[in-house]
Image (cartoon, helix red, strand yellow):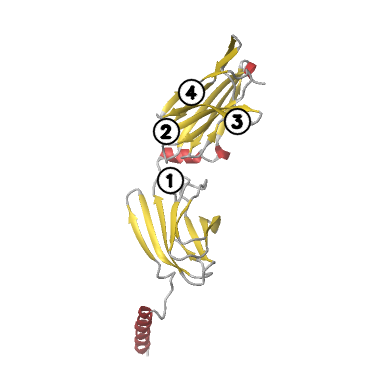
């Protein structure tokens, strides 16, 4: 009897396989195809399949391409509204992080900035909510497998809530040291400060600010000195820091008041990897309102 039952299971398995090959049975989720390209430092995954109307489809899992930024794209081959929900994995399961809507046929790059852990696992939940016909798609993800110690430190300091300042006041003035990281093409603003020294000659006020930046990684940094007006912040002068290490930000300022308030706008324009930095400013009390 046992032998007959086993034979029956084999016959059913062959029959189901035959029907599936003919297209009578099948799941587009199960039939989604992955193509994986892996190196010692990263992994890229292409997933192809179909999105059925109001049926959730999940992407492969992936991580950051560079610290704080997962790089993923979606190509759809039929028009129809697609809801794409980025999720991240926790000990209690998957949680939603951000939602995008893809409204047209073609190529979409998902732009995401995140302060979640450096090795957080992500996935997308795709829902076809606009087309009763299945939407063929191709999803792409690129994941860096290992980050350097400098990148880990930079990422730990990247969250604005984690940017640290050390303020020291003495009988002459106030010194501020700010520690953080500069992300690629993401503006970062320093603390405010005043002149380090200024004088008036022939009716013209001339001075300079005692500021510097110390970077832990090479990469072009755009440093724009700004001053405060009643209408907001205005640019005064732009410097470029192109080397790793200490740079004194030397700017001679003319025709502004003794109590002008300044700050720097830093932009990492040369490195897709975060640049850890320390910024220093020194302001005597006589230049502080």
The residue sitting at 43% across, 64% down in the picture is 77
Q: Mark 2 highlights which residue?
A: 220
The residue sitting at 40% across, 64% down in the picture is 48
Rounded to the nearest angstrom, the CA distance separating label 4 from label 2 is 14 Å
- Where does residue 59 sit, x and y in percent of width and height? 45, 61
Residue 3 picture quarter: bottom left
The residue sitting at 52% across, 65% down in the picture is 127
Residue 62 picture quarter: bottom left
Between 232 and 53, the residue placed more toward the observer is 232
Rounded to the nearest angstrom, the CA distance separating label 4 from label 3 is 19 Å
Q: Mark 3 highlights which residue?
A: 233
Dot 1 or dot 4, earlier in sequence: 1
Dot 2 or dot 1, earlier in sequence: 1
Rounded to the nearest angstrom, the CA distance separating label 2 from label 1 is 17 Å
**In which quadrant of the rendered image does the C terminus lie?**
top right
Rounded to the nearest angstrom, the CA distance separating label 3 from label 2 is 23 Å
Rounded to the nearest angstrom, the CA distance separating label 3 from label 1 is 31 Å
- Give the mark toward the camera: 3 or 1: 3
Q: Is residue 1 above or below residue 145?
A: below
Q: Any mark on residue 249, and which? A: 4
- Give the mark toward the camera: 3 or 2: 3
- Where does residue 270 sit, x and y in percent of width and height? 41, 36
Dot 3 or dot 1, earlier in sequence: 1
The answer to whether residue 62 of the structure is visible from this angle is no
- Where does residue 136 sit, x and y in percent of width and height? 43, 67
Q: Secondary structure at mark 2?
A: loop
Cβ atoms at labels 4 and 2 below 8 Å apart: no
Dot 4 or dot 2, earlier in sequence: 2
Q: Any mark on residue 66, and which? A: 1
């Amino acid at each position: 009897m046992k032998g007959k039952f086993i034979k029956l299971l084999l016959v059913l398995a062959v029959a189901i396989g035959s029907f599936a090959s003919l297209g009578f049975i099948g799941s587009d989720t199960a039939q989604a195809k992955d193509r994986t390209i892996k190196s010692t430092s990263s992994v890229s995954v292409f997933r192809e399949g179909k999105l059925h109307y109001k049926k959730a489809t999940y992407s492969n899992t992936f991580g950051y391409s560079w610290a704080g930024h997962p790089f993923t794209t979606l190509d759809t081959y039929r028009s129809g509204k697609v809801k794409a929900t980025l999720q991240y994995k926790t000990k209690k399961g998957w949680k939603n992080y951000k939602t995008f809507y893809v409204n047209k046929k073609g190529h979409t790059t998902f732009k995401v900035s995140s302060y979640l852990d450096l090795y957080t696992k992500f996935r997308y939940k795709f829902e076809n909510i606009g087309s009763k016909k299945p939407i063929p798609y191709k999803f792409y993800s690129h994941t860096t497998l290992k980050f350097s110690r400098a990148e880990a430190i930079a990422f730990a300091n990247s969250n604005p809530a984690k940017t640290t300042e050390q303020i020291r006041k003495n009988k002459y003035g106030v010194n501020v040291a700010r520690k953080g990281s500069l992300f690629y093409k993401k503006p970062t603003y320093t603390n405010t400060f005043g002149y380090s020294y200024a004088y008036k000659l022939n009716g013209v006020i001339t001075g300079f600010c005692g500021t510097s930046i110390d970077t832990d990684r090479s990469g072009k940094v755009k440093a724009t000195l700004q001053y405060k007006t009643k209408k907001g912040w205005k640019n005064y002068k732009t410097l470029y820091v192109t080397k790793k290490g200490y740079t004194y930000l030397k700017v001679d300022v003319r025709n502004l008041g003794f109590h002008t308030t300044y700050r720097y706008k830093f932009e990492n324009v040369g490195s897709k990897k975060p640049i850890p930095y320390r910024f220093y400013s020194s302001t005597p009390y006589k230049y502080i309102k």
